[in-house]
Each structure stands twice: as C-alpha cells, then as structure tokens.
Image (cartoon, rainbow, N blue to C red):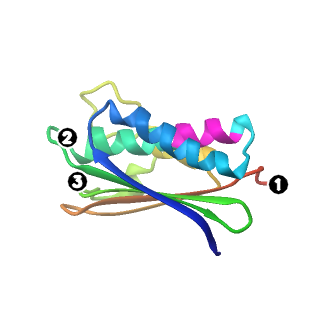
Amino acid sequence: MKTENEMKISFISKSENEGFARTAVSAFAALCDPCVEDIADIRTAVSEAVTNCIVHAYRGTQGIVEITARILSGNELYIRIKDKGCGIADVKQAMEPLYTSAPFEERAGLGFAVMESFMDSLSVRSEVGRGTVVTMRKRIGGKDE
C-alpha cells in the first residue's frame, strides 16, 4: 500500500505523555475524516500500547517511546509504537486476555486484547532486552464498507 502521509513522534516514557500520544495520533488520523467511533477506537488502542511501554517496558526507569503513523492508500491508518525496553519473553502468552506480568499491581492484563478489538489488525514483535514493536492498522470508515 502506498503511503499518502506520515508523522513520527518520540517522547519520554512518562505517564503524562500517554495523553499527548493519544491526542497526537488521533489528530493525525483526523486527516482521514473518521467518524467519532473510529477516533475513539484509535485513541483507546494507542493509549493501551503507550501505557504498556510506560508500565511494563520501562518499569522503574524511563526510556523513549517512538510512534510512527501513516495514512495509506485506501484510507487505512497504520500505527507503529516502539520501545527499547525490557522486551517480552513470550508474546503469545502476553497477548492472552487477563495475563499480566505485574500481578502484584492493579492491572487487568487486557491491553493487547483491547488493542486487537478496536483495530483491524495487531502485530507484536519483541526481543528480551531489546524492546517491543506494536503495529496496528485500521481502515477508516469501518471494516465492512
């Protein structure tokens, strides 16, 4: 698919930057003239992915979160959220609903399930000690149009 437009941002993994990330990506997605439901889905999925970086990837420390968003031909939004944190040993297990690597905290373990439910596709690649890349796609205008 051809890239029609692209934005890139990076920021420190501070909790106050989660709202910035969510707003920046949804503002970029607004160029596709989405409905309110599409924007809400995008905001939620980005929020979950960035929160995972802050809470899990850089637990007890700080690092950089990078977001690349592209508008592809066919009015499809591509979002890649990348960290260079601790990585995930077992991605398949981490994507299971209710699994959490922090059972001692008040975490539901639903981040990946939420991302998957709001986007058309979700891909997670990770390497222990090197970080994680979450890639999401959503066709603006709905899956069935």
Q: For this rendering, which residue is in front, 56 or 67? A: 67
Tag 3 or tag 2, which sits nearer the N-term? 2
Magenta stretch mostly in which secondary structure? helix
Residue at the limit of the structure toward the left, as seen here: 61
Task: Tell which of 47 and 108 is nearer to you.
Answer: 47
Question: Label 3 near label 1: C-beta < 8 Å?
Answer: no
Asked if one can make out residue 97 in the rendered structure from this viewpoint, the answer is no
**Type of amino acid at the residue the image marks with label 1:** Asp
Quadrant showing the C terminus: bottom right
Q: Is residue 9 left or right of residue 144?
A: left
Q: Position of residue 124 (x, y in %)?
A: 43, 60
Secondary structure beneath label 2: loop
Find the distance from the CA under tag 1 to the CA under tag 2. Answer: 39 Å
Mark nearer the N terminus (1 vs 3): 3
- Residue ID at (18%, 43%): 62
Q: Residue at x 22, y 54 (%)?
A: 85
Please indicate whether residue 73 sits to the left or right of residue 87 in the image: right
Asked whether the beta carbons under mark 2 and mark 3 sit within 8 Å of each other, the answer is yes
**Spatial distance from mark 2 to mark 3, Cα to Cα?**
8 Å
* Neighbourhood count class around disc 2 (C-alpha, 10 Å): few under 14, some 14–19, many 20 upward: some
Q: Amino acid at mark 3?
A: Gly
Whether residue 45 is visible? yes
| In this picture, residue 47 sits left or right of residue 12 | right
User: Residue at point 14% right, 41% down?
Assistant: 61
Residue 85 numbered mark, or none: 3
Separation of residues labelled 1 and 3 (CA atoms): 37 Å
Residue 93 in the image, given as x and y percentages of width and height: 39, 53
Q: Which residue is mark 2?
A: 59
Rendering coords of residue 53 (x, y %): 32, 45
Q: What span is in magenta?
A: 38-45
Q: Secondary structure at mark 1?
A: loop
Residue holding disc 1: 144
